[in-house]
Image (cartoon, rainbow, N blue to C red):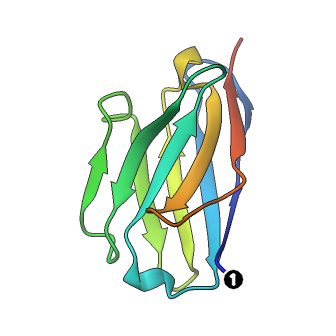
Amino acid sequence: EVQLVESGGGLVQPGGSLRLSCAASGFTFKDYTMMWVRQAPGKGLEWVSTIDSGGGSTMYAASAKGRFTISRDNTKNTLYLQMNSLKPGDTAMYYCEKPSTTRGQGTQVTVSS
């Protein structure tokens, strides 16, 4: 069974940082492109970032570029999202996703003073 378990969310002040993690199991993690998506209250799902299977190629939404960094450790079957310079507009539930197949249960990020 494919499982994705996110962690690392929380309440942070504007300008702060958080590092999200996603522990993957039930599939050969190193063979798959992975992504982060988010959903703000009352809004639809928004793509945030994608990383290829080897970690050498990344893409970011305009809202994340320059502030967020996606990475992965294929020896630990773990996906990461380092988020810096957080803004209130980044408040959302963050999900890791094995594209087109599985999404985790999410971790809440709240940016507020």
Instruction: Identify which residue, 111 or 98, lies in the foreground.
Output: 98
Q: Where is residue 68? Give x, y as percent.
A: 42, 41
Q: Residue at x 35, y 62 (%)?
A: 51
Query: Which residue in the protein does label 1 denote?
Result: 1
Quick one: label 1, few (<14), some, or many (20+) residues within 10 Å?
few
Query: Is 18 left or right of 53, judged from the image as shown?
Result: right
Q: Residue at x 31, y 68 (%)?
A: 52
Q: What is the total number of numbered labels drawn onto the structure image?
A: 1
Instruction: Identify which residue, 29 or 14, lies in the foreground.
Output: 29
Quadrant for the C terminus, please.
top right
Q: Where is residue 84? Give x, y as percent.
A: 49, 34
Q: Where is residue 60? Give x, y as percent.
A: 31, 43
Q: Residue at x 42, y 41 (%)?
A: 47
From the viewer's perspective, is residue 16 above or below residue 10? above
Disc 1 marks which amino acid?
Glu
Residue lying farthest top? 113
From the viewer's perspective, is residue 65 above or below residue 73? above
Q: Quadrant of residue 77?
A: bottom right
Quadrant for the N terminus, please.
bottom right
Residue lying farthest front? 100
Badge 1 element: loop
From the viewer's perspective, is residue 89 above or below residue 21? above
Residue lying farthest left? 57
From the viewer's perspective, is residue 54 above or below residue 63? below
Instruction: Identify which residue, 92 or 7, lies in the foreground.
Output: 92
Q: Where is residue 80? Give x, y as percent.
A: 53, 59
Q: Residue at x 39, y 34 (%)?
A: 67
